[in-house]
Amino acid sequence: MPEPQTGMRRLAVPGWMRRHTPLLGRLLEQLAAVGVLDCATRLAAQAFLGALPAIFVVAAVAPGWVKEELISSLRETLGLPDAALDQVRAVYAATDPTAIAGSSAVGILVTLLSATACSRALQKTCERSWHLPKAKARLAAWRWLAWLVVWLGALLFQGPVQNAFGAGMAVGFLVALVSSALLWWWTQHLLLGGRVPWLPLLPGAVLAGTGGQLLSLGSRVYMPRAVDRSMQQFGALGSVFVLLSWLIAFFIVITLAISVGYVVAHEPLPARRLRTPPRT
């Protein structure tokens, strides 16, 4: 395995913790080294800023059914109320397709670069979690775009998946959990450039898929009230504040999952079953 990154933060774990609760000590060291809140905040900001240009492009060029599927996915995944979804529909209605069609190639390139900022930040999080050096840009660039395209497609169909294509919420939860875990399994392998075998990445993928689905389930209860209250206080900007807060919470869950997955994959029993390469 390549040499770990230098300059990672270390946490001084007490000796009694190493002796009596070694797993807890390793978890705390890992979370301190990764900087969970740092990574999550950066990821949320990049997702928020990179998503806006993509939303306008979708609103301008996508057919009507794609727009409705996206709105359904936002309702099922984030639990957004009708008032917030009406703002999304207003963006669709206000966007001029001819203006987008007349955009220059440079403008389209800038939009793509902005949208891939989230995948670049996520790659750094995966590398920090697995203590790997930064991949060369010329080798990783196509992976950023591939991740973005696949996840935009996955987001588009989250509405039907969350409902298991009509089978109900209970079955939909299981289907969404499995599909989410598979996506995060593939995401780690893709963004790490294949430097870590598939099996050791499985614990982090399962934790990310489970955590993301539990957050989505809780959002259906919390988000409608939070958005309504925030819109009453701040107007149209209220939904923006709540959405950014949700993104931070989501990426905290994902960063924790990937970081903890590294520790679990290196524990003696899972390491033998998963054939995890030894720490360097």
Image (tube, helix red, strand yellow):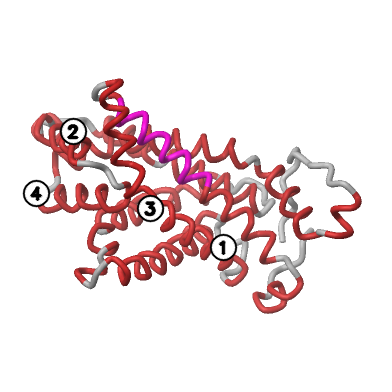
Relative horizontal placement of residue 29, taking residue 202 as reference (left or right): right
Q: Name which residue type carries label 3.
A: Ser
Queried whether the magenta region covers residue 250, the answer comes back as yes
The residue sitting at the bottom extreme is: 273
Q: Name which residue type carries label 1.
A: Gly
The residue sitting at the top extreme is: 234
> Which residue in the structure is indicated by mark 4?
64
Q: Name which residue type carries label 2.
A: Gln
Q: Name which residue type carries label 4.
A: Gly
Q: Residues within 10 Å of mark 2 (few under 14, many from 20)?
A: few
Q: In what quadrant of the picture does the N terminus appear?
A: bottom right
Q: In which quadrant of the rendered view does residue 33 lie?
A: top right
Q: Position of residue 72 (x, y in %)?
A: 20, 52
User: Mark 1 and mark 3: span between their CA atoms?
Assistant: 29 Å
Q: Position of residue 151 (x, y in %)?
A: 35, 54
Asked if marks 1 and 3 touch (Cβ < 8 Å), the reply is: no
Marks 3, 4: nearer the viewer: 3
Q: Residues within 10 Å of mark 1 (few under 14, many from 20)?
A: few
Indicate whether 151 appears above or below 235.
below
Q: Main secondary structure of the magenta part?
A: helix
User: Mark 2 and mark 4: span between their CA atoms?
Assistant: 16 Å
Residue, x 35% and y 36% (percent of image)?
A: 243
> Which residue in the structure is indicated by mark 1?
194
Indicate whether 191 appears above or below 225.
below
Asked if marks 2 and 4 touch (Cβ < 8 Å), the reply is: no
SS of the residue under disc 2: helix
Q: In which quadrant of the rendered view does residue 19 lie?
A: bottom right
Sequence-wise, the earlier of marks 1 and 4 is 4
Sequence-wise, the earlier of marks 2 and 4 is 4
